[in-house]
Image: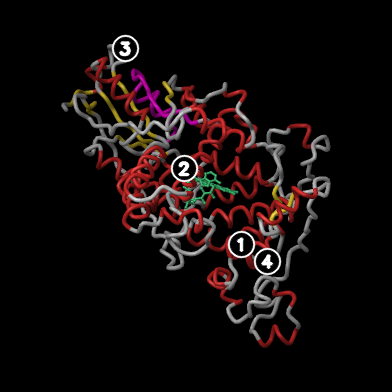
Amino acid sequence: MSALTASALSTVGKAMTIHLFRFDLRLHDNQALTTSLNNARQTQTPFLPLYIFDPAQLSKQSPSRLKFLLESVSTLRTSLQNNLCIRIGDPVQIISEEFPEAAIFTQLEPCRDERKISQSLDATEIHGTYLYSPSDLPFPLSQMPDVFTPFRSKMEKSKSIDINFTTCNLDNVVILECDKGKIPELSELTSQPLPTFDSRSVLNFTGGEDKALERVNDYIFKQDNLKNYFNTRNGLIGATYSTKLSPWLALGCLSPRYVAKMVKKYEQERVENKSTYWLIFELLVRDFCRLFALKHGDKIFLLDGILGRRAHGGHQNSVKWSLDTGYANSKADSWKEGRTGYPFVDANMRELKATGFMSNRGRQNVASFLALDLNQDWRFGAEHFEEYLLDYDIYSNYVSWCMAAGMTGGRVNKFNVIKQAKDYDPEGEYVKLWCPELSSVPKEYIFEPWKMSKEKQQEYNCVVGRDYPERVVEMKVFKPRTDKPKKEKKMKEKYKGGFYKVVG
Ligand SMILES: Cc1cc2nc3c(=O)[nH]c(=O)nc-3n(C[C@H](O)[C@H](O)[C@H](O)COP(=O)(O)OP(=O)(O)OC[C@H]3O[C@@H](n4cnc5c(N)ncnc54)[C@H](O)[C@@H]3O)c2cc1C
């Protein structure tokens, strides 16, 4: 590895190769980085790995998210032997002004803001961070099923996951000499108080490729949790009920194919069972969200989702939305703050704000509650998740919300948050962890404190309206559809009655 100066090269056309890192902050299984490095080697142009902190994106993120990002970028810089160049500002402006002669390579990000940047820079975009690359789909993208199950069965039949990938290195490339810049301090990126660790957190998340690989090894091999994943994945408390890999996957510190490779190894060395299958299944749901976004583009950000005008009465999932933020005890703001009066919803919302994480079970319930019980514009929920989730990923988040609201057209799952709490937090342990004002309330009332008499409220130290909020709304419980009674009965059994189809 040696260095050349930018000024010496500015006269010879595409005189340098830049890899613009975005959501691919790793060296292992990084197809875009592999392509950039190959270009630099083949054209014998100097190479610059670049990361740009874009204020337009940073302003939407909580301090905990920013901390995780800084740790991830800093780890990447170390892995690249301090050659990662750092800038802060508008990527298009910075690259056009400082590196006008560069050939830019970057991972293709399906959504609008990222694509706009790539297109303005005339960048070469390369697919990455999938189990199955879009080029491996057994159908044209335009014919991809909009519902997961048919998508899954087509994918599983078509091709096995390619786990023969390499780890990039800087061998035989010349690094462009320029001011490499400094990684900003967290306090430079936010004016909000800096995050502190909450001991109730599921995990003490630290960003970076090394920590991601360590977590994979801990969860799968050291703690041997994978064999039980299928049975534990709907848990709510602690590090072991699910992998907690999502924050690293979201920033691309971890490749899903690396996880698949480790699952395969585990199957060969220890056990192959429903749990090992199910982790790959979940990673395929992640692929589905990314590909859905690639197929439908900006529609995933629209209130009517992919339904368009059909969402105004023409489709069975049509809903009249409202948004009532900004006044005292508004429904939407109560949801955000964990003050809805429904303990299971409130516990989850408080966990999110305090730690940047929420279980999948929790996310499904609070999303259903905001959209289908409170009838609020679902994008308000998606934006709140965007601010706080350490694993915020534009595709999984917006597609999951759009789906929860029924705006992807498939079956709507209206969650009965009381029934769900009884099934998944039978002792009320989770609710008490996040809503300590309910700590003396017995199991019988823990998910429905409004049912306590005035005397009982005094006795259990929890007066509704004083110690714990009144309900913002009386929850609607939809009756299952009766046109296919046998199927409904099966579904009710399968989901223990906590899972309803919306009617009418
Ligand atoms: C309304 C809503 C919003 C969501 N927003 C996000 C988001 O911004 N980022 C995000 O990564 N996930 C999101 N999810 C999906 C899911 O809740 C999380 O991926 C999961 O809880 C992360 O925990 P884990 O890593 O322990 O998951 P595990 O159960 O261990 O699963 C392993 C991996 O599979 C993927 N995965 C699992 N379930 C899903 C799913 N339903 N959809 C997509 N991928 C999945 C994730 O990458 C996850 O890390 C959302 C779900 C809902 C209902």
Which residue is tagged 4? 342
Residue at image x 44%, y 27%?
127
Q: Position of residue 476 (x, y in %)?
A: 78, 58
Disc number lying in front (2 or 1):
2
Which residue is tagged 2? 280
- Secondary structure found at label 4: loop
CA separation in Å, label 3 and label 1? 54 Å
Relative to residue 494, is residue 466 depicted above or below? below
CA separation in Å, label 3 and label 2? 45 Å
First along the sequence among labels 2 and 1? 2
CA separation in Å, label 3 and label 4? 63 Å
- Secondary structure found at label 1: helix
Which residue is tagged 3? 13
Name the residue nearer the viewer: 228 or 308. Answer: 228
Residue at image x 44%, y 66%?
198
Amino acid found under the numbered disc labelled 1: Glu
In magenta stretch: residue 90: yes
Q: Position of residue 89 (x, y in %)?
A: 42, 36
Q: Which residues are magenta?
A: 88-109
Amino acid found under the numbered disc labelled 3: Gly
Which residue is tagged 1? 337
Determine crowd level at label 4: few under 14, some 14-19, many 20+ residues with C-alpha closer than 10 A. Answer: many
